[in-house]
Image (tube, helix red, strand yellow):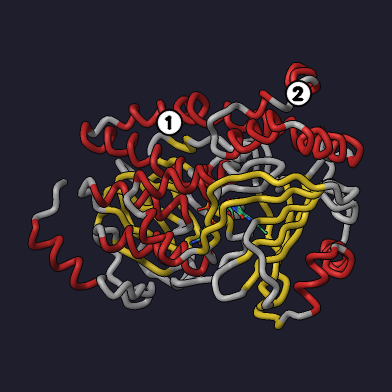
């Protein structure tokens, strides 16, 4: 398994410029240890960790990197922790914008200021940086749209549009984000639909802003709008709505965005003086670890938004997507080393044990704060309660379970503190 240093060097020379060979020109007969389909944060993090352990990983994406990805571009502490463990935080920070505060507005425009450590960085840059790190460490990049992933003898085959031969590997990882096209051909997920939908645009404006702004504006409920400052006077401004129970609100998000952009004072101020950098673009989100088994087949795992790693209510998902990449790489390492693929069975259990508890409070928050009355009440309470503000900051830092606030006991406790 371990690559000879000569082969590694050759591969480094071949791919150090990160050019992605296209299916038409790339020889696809090499067997790999792991084929990772999707090079967003979850796939790139899986590939990075596997390559560091000298496994032959091929990292496949339909897009040529760097590429744009619709997102709010906010990194909350869980992302920063994963990046730090991967040794990439300094590199990301250099390309990012540092933000140390978050202001949350309620439906009636009451607001509360929270402290925290955040970064904003366009996904164009973040994903390229992660992708490049995976390649620098030895993953083989490959550009092509995968049309099927299937068990094949003692391994897996990856069929690509426009390629005459499949890519073969001992195992595969699906990291295709909210696109469930490939997943459903392997195993019908119990839940195919998206949990939220959101859109954003980039604008450039001289309006100063040193914090992330989130607004549970009446025009957006059940959902929220955000204004995130980026480097070079740019802003990521967007909004999204989430599914309540089984119902996705029947709304026109573009109209909602217009109401927010012309009615919310800070958005109005920024937009009036702004130059448009990109049009509004939207995308779906899969949240709450719901509806898709992370072990699709005895040799095929799924990571990231494919298994719904994005947080309900906040829609933050980069951190947890990368965490599943870390976990998947570690169980794959064990299985590949021993050639015992039964070992992959611990992967769903690990996700349940380590990640599931992180989601519970966000699901409760999503239900409660769909009501304008409760949102306003919580913001008003938090404004008056240093205890609640500290707990909220600790929840964002993942030091405290969100149930500390989003439970009857939590609410009662906050009444007198
Ligand atoms: C509007 C919006 C705002 C958001 N804001 C934030 C935020 O501020 N902070 C945050 O943490 N999260 C945010 N999120 C969530 C975040 O974008 C996701 O959680 C994150 O992208 C998940 O990463 P991933 O690697 O699982 O999937 P993705 O990033 O979606 O990557 C999937 C990759 O798979 C590739 N792919 C798909 N199908 C195929 C195929 N058949 N063949 C080859 N390649 C394929 C795609 O090209 C893509 O590169 C936001 C999402 C939206 C929609």
* Residue lying at 48% horizontally and 64% vertically, measured from the top left: 96
Q: Nearer the viewer, residue 381 or 327?
A: 381
Q: Is mark 2 on a helix, strand or loop?
A: helix
In the image, taking residue 297 as reference, residue 275 lies left or right, namely right
Instruction: Work out whether residue 246 can be spotted.
Output: no
Where does the image place residue 49, in percent across and percent down from the top left? 31, 47
Question: Which residue appears farthest toward the bottom when viewing the image?
Answer: 275
Residue 347's tag is 1
Q: In this view, does 281 lie above or below 184?
A: below
Q: Which of 374 and 183 is in front in this view?
A: 374
* Residue lying at 58% horizontally and 31% vertically, measured from the top left: 358
Nearest-to-viewer mark from 2 and 1 = 2
Q: Which of 216 and 150 is in front in this view?
A: 216
* Residue lying at 49% horizontally and 38% vertically, measured from the top left: 296
Q: In this view, does 126 lie above or below 393?
A: below
Q: Is residue 296 above or below residue 37?
A: above
Quadrant containing the C terminus in the rendered view = top right
Q: In which quarter of the image is residue 181?
A: bottom right
**Mark pair 2, 1: CA separation:** 37 Å
Picture quarter with ligand 1: bottom right
Q: In which quarter of the image is residue 307?
A: top right
Please say if the residues under marks 2 and 1 sit with CB atoms less than 8 Å apart.
Answer: no
Where does the image place residue 339, in percent across and percent down from the top left? 23, 34
Q: Is mark 1 on a helix, strand or loop?
A: helix
In the image, taking residue 91 as reference, residue 182 lies left or right, namely right
């Amino acid at each position: 398994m371990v690559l000879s240093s000569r082969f590694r060097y050759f591969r480094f020379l071949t791919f150090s410029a990160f050019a992605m060979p296209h299916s038409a020109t790339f020889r696809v007969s090499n067997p790999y240890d792991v084929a990772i389909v999707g090079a967003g944060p979850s796939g790139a993090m899986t590939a990075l960790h596997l390559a560091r352990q000298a496994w032959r990983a091929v990292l496949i994406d339909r897009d040529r990197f760097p590429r744009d990805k619709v997102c709010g571009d906010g990194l909350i502490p869980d992302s920063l922790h994963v990046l730090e463990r991967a040794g990439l935080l300094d590199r990301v920070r250099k390309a990012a914008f540092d933000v140390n505060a978050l202001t949350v507005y309620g439906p009636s425009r009451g607001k509360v200021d929270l402290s925290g450590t955040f970064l904003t960085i366009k996904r164009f840059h973040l994903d390229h940086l992660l992708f490049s790190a995976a390649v620098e460490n030895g993953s083989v990049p490959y550009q092509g749209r995968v049309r099927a992933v299937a068990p094949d003898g003692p391994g897996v085959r990856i069929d690509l549009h426009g390629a005459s031969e499949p890519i073969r590997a001992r195992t595969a990882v699906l990291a295709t984000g909210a696109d469930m096209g490939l997943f459903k051909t392997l195993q019908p997920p119990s839940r195919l639909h998206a949990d939220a939908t959101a859109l954003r645009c980039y604008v450039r404006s001289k309006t100063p802003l040193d914090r992330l702004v989130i607004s549970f504006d009446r025009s957006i409920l059940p959902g929220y709008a955000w204004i995130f400052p980026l480097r070079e006077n740019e802003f990521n401004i967007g909004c999204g709505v989430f599914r309540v129970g089984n119902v996705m609100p029947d709304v026109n998000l573009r109209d909602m965005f217009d109401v927010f952009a012309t009615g919310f004072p800070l958005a109005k101020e920024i937009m009036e003086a702004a130059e448009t950098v990109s049009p509004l673009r939207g995308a779906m989100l899969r949240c709450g670890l719901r509806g898709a088994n992370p072990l699709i087949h005895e040799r095929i795992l799924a990571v990231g938004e494919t298994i719904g790693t994005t947080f309900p209510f906040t829609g933050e998902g980069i951190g947890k997507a990368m965490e599943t990449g870390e976990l998947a790489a570690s169980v794959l390492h064990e299985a590949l080393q021993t050639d015992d693929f039964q070992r992959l069975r611990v992967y769903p259990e690990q996700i349940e044990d380590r990640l599931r508890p992180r989601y519970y409070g966000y699901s409760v928050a999503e239900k409660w704060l769909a009501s304008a009355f409760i949102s306003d009440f919580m913001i008003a309470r938090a404004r008056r309660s240093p205890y609640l503000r500290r707990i909220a900051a600790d929840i964002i830092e993942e030091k405290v379970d969100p149930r500390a606030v989003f439970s009857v006991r939590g609410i009662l406790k906050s009444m007198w503190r």
